[in-house]
Amino acid sequence: MNKILILSIIFVSFLGFTSCEKEEIETYQDTDNIYFSNALYAPNGISEPVRDSTGFSFSLDRPAITGRIFKIPIRVQGNLSDVDRKVKLTVDPSSTAIEGTHFSLPKEIYLHAGKHVDTVDVAFFRTPDMKTNQYTLVLNLEENEWFTTKMQTKVVNSITGKTMSFIRCKITFDDKLTQPPGWFAAYLGVFTAKKFFLMCELMSLNPEMFAQKLGSPGLTVPDVTYYQNFMKRYLADQKKSGNTIYEEDGTEMFLP
């Protein structure tokens, strides 16, 4: 009886071994598809939704800032390569931004060797007309000798209810300065660009900090109270010395 049981176990084990030997892992057989990574993968992988459009503003940048480099992630659905592969990227006619004036693209764009994910570095230039106009840049990925664009299917964004494209990316940008979320008017008074940048310059504050909500680091009530008292003393000292600080409209700069 024991001998029969042992032989049965050996036989079953042999069948399992031979079936495992015959099983093969399937490899990717389709063409290599290029697409914008953020349309399928959230930018930070956790809290942000996937997206096919984004935007930014120069408005909270210091006046000395004349441009930005904006990195757009691209990804391949397919095989890795041991050589750089050229990516075809074109500007959509619906764009309102002017190439050479508001932005510039690299002359050659590549998905570099050994990478599934790479970036397209777009240079944006800060121009005076951005203070009154908002511009858009729409980029399209197209097929070439290296990549196909079969991932054109638009998917529904469960958060916004909108559809997205894997091969079209829209960037909106301007330099319109409006009151940022972190400006506490009860302590700092009416928001003006001159007062805002003067305060940041005098106290070495990063203007982008005010893009956060009140209560964030640097924007608690004690922080804002300190900014208020500092500016009130500064304005009073300047006025006493005969150098009254005025707003752009000619009115005296004031804090509550």
Image (spheres, rainbow, N blue to C red):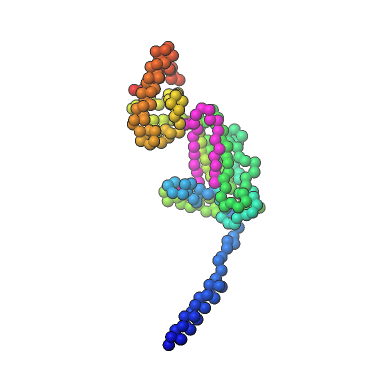
Query: 89 or 60: which is nearer to us?
Result: 60
Q: Which quarter of the picture shows residue 198?
A: top left
Q: Residue at x 51, y 27 (%)?
A: 63
Decide if residue 149 is on the left or right side of residue 157: right
Does the image show residue 154? yes
Does the image show residue 149? no
Query: 221 or 143: which is nearer to us?
Result: 221
Span of residues in magenta: 49-73
* Above or below for 37 versus 94: below
* Above or below for 240 versus 21: above
Decide if residue 86 is on the left or right side of residue 52: right
Q: Percent from the top left, x then y, of residue 86?
A: 64, 48
Please, which residue is most extreme toward the bottom here?
1
The question of residue 104 being in magenta is answered with no
The question of residue 67 being in magenta is answered with yes
Please state, as top left, top right, bottom left or bottom right, where the C terminus lies in the image: top left
Count of numbered labels shown in the rendering: 0
Q: Percent from the top left, x then y, of residue 71?
A: 55, 42
* Above or below for 144 versus 101: below
Q: Which quarter of the picture shows residue 219?
A: top left
Q: Residue at x 53, y 35 (%)?
A: 135
Q: Residue at x 47, y 47 (%)?
A: 44
Q: Percent from the top left, x then y, of residue 234?
A: 40, 19
Please state, as top left, top right, bottom left or bottom right, where the N terminus lies in the image: bottom left
